[in-house]
Image (cartoon, rainbow, N blue to C red):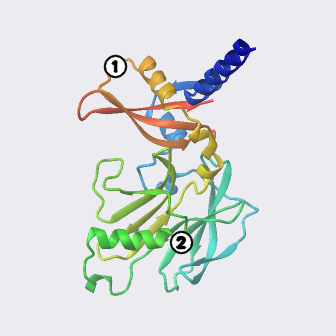
Amino acid sequence: MRRCVIRVFLCLMIAVLLVLSGCSGRKYSFYTPSSKEERARLFPNPTAPRKESEQKSFSDSEAPSGKTISFQGLQVYGIYYSSYQKDGLETVVHRYVADRVNDLMLTWFSVRKSDEQLLYAEFGSVSGEEAAAEMSEAEAEEKAKKIGSEWMSLDESRTTRVLFNENGERYSWYIFRFARIVNDIETTDYVEVALTEKGALRYISSPNPGWSEKRAADMKAFSLAKAEEEVRKNCDFPILRIVPSRFGIDADDRLYLEYSVFTSSDVARVVYVYME
């Protein structure tokens, strides 16, 4: 009887260890795009702001010809312009040209078709901005955080200052990204706020709002040890260190973890690991 109890106890301990180590039947697969075009299609660049205008547009007959949104306490009316399919969301986004006569100087905005959630708003020049005093980075971040908190909760987020675009050119604006964090890793579920050096709002964007909440369990179950094992097994170049960068969803709505694999102290290559 005692031996039976011991065996049952040992079996339970082994099962617990297997779950904790990530051996719960989930498979991990390594992937690296074969071309820049393929990478751009599958993994929309989370470090490059304002890519919405490059999405392939079409006209949606079901889109309202006009729409009114509320932003910072004011109502803004927009006229339908075009639509596009958003990668990773399996949904359609409608773009609107805003009424040019509005106190916010809001010129463009986009909403998600399924629930009419505001995803993007762009602003023109602000009267009197030239005479305003320049903001410090700390002041700009505080203002950006206040605006961003109106779009999503920033309680479990990490602040990143976006300095360069994908061509390596430095932005002249303050651009702050507040990204949700899961298991101490950023996700591509973020809100991004751009301010001029004098504090005028230029755009606010949240391209994949809320997806991390729906996939939180998958991300928490993601085994970094198994994922790193896949990276080491498949990389055909010397590895100095492996750093998990961010969780995201690709164009087919599959969860991935992006890794920066350093081949030297300052040279890194980007690879991806899926959990299936």
Q: Please tell me how crowded label 1 is: few (under 14), some (14-19), or many (20+) other residues with Cα within 10 Å.
A: few
Q: Quadrant of residue 151?
A: bottom right
Q: Residue at x 50, y 74 (%)?
A: 107
| Distance CA(mark 2)–CA(mark 1) | 45 Å
Whole-percent x, y for residue 198 in the image? 30, 77
Rendered view: 8 above or below 42:
above
Whole-percent x, y for residue 37 in the image? 48, 36
Report the quarter where the N terminus lies: top right
Q: Please tell me how crowded label 2 is: few (under 14), some (14-19), or many (20+) other residues with Cα within 10 Å.
A: few
Secondary structure of residue under mark 1:
loop
Q: Which residue is mark 2?
A: 150
Whole-percent x, y for residue 44 in the image? 50, 45
Q: Residue at x 47, y 57 (%)?
A: 157
Q: Residue at x 61, y 28 (%)?
A: 19
Q: Is residue 158 left or right of residue 161?
A: right
Q: Which residue is mark 1?
A: 237
Mark 2 and mark 1 lie on one chain; the one further toward the N terminus is 2
Report the quarter where the C terminus lies: top right
Rendered view: 222 above or below 80:
above
Report the front residue among 238 and 104: 238
Q: Using the rendered image of the protein, determine whether residue 250 is visible from the camera's viewpoint.
A: no
